[in-house]
Amino acid sequence: MTFWEKFKLLSSNVLDFIMPFLKFLLTQSGKILAEVALEAVTECNNLDLSNEDKRNEAFNKIIESLSLKGITLAKSIINLAIEAAVVKLKDTGK
């Protein structure tokens, strides 16, 4: 993301929309979720499944990993993390 793209984001209403998710990601649970989601999406990316099945598999892996760490989160937060991880994978070309 270029400087001007970041500046444009900061001065837009989009930032207000995504701010709750960004604030959550700055918490310890958010950092763990981001790491676990990226790992799960990366693992599921190469499976011979439909995109919907890959998403379901990643969701289940995330729930399991978070559960082992004693973390329970709303499905909506986990789904946002999956979508963010997919975008990150696409941006890095994996």
Image (tube, grey):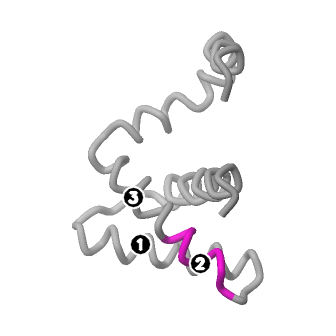
In the image, 86 versus 1, the foreground residue is 1
Residue 74 drawn at (x, y percent)? 45, 57
Residue sitting at x 65%, y 80%: 46
Q: Amino acid at mark 2?
A: Cys
For the residues labelled 2 and 1, the Cα–Cα distance comes to 14 Å
Residue annotated with mark 1: 63
Badge 1: residue crowd in 10 Å (few <14, some 14–19, many ≥20): many
Residue 90, percent from left and from top: 70, 56
Residue that numbered label 2 is attached to = 44
What separation in Å lies between label 2 and label 3 (alpha carbons)?
21 Å
Which residue is rendered at x = 66% and y = 10% of the image?
Answer: 11
Location of residue 12 with respect to 42 vertically, above or below: above
Give the alpha-carbon distance from disc 3 to disc 1, as whole Å: 8 Å
Is residue 43 depicted above or below 17 in this figure?
below
At label 3, which amino acid type do we have? Leu
Magenta segment boundaries in residue numbering: 40-47
The residue positioned farthest toward the left in the image shown: 70
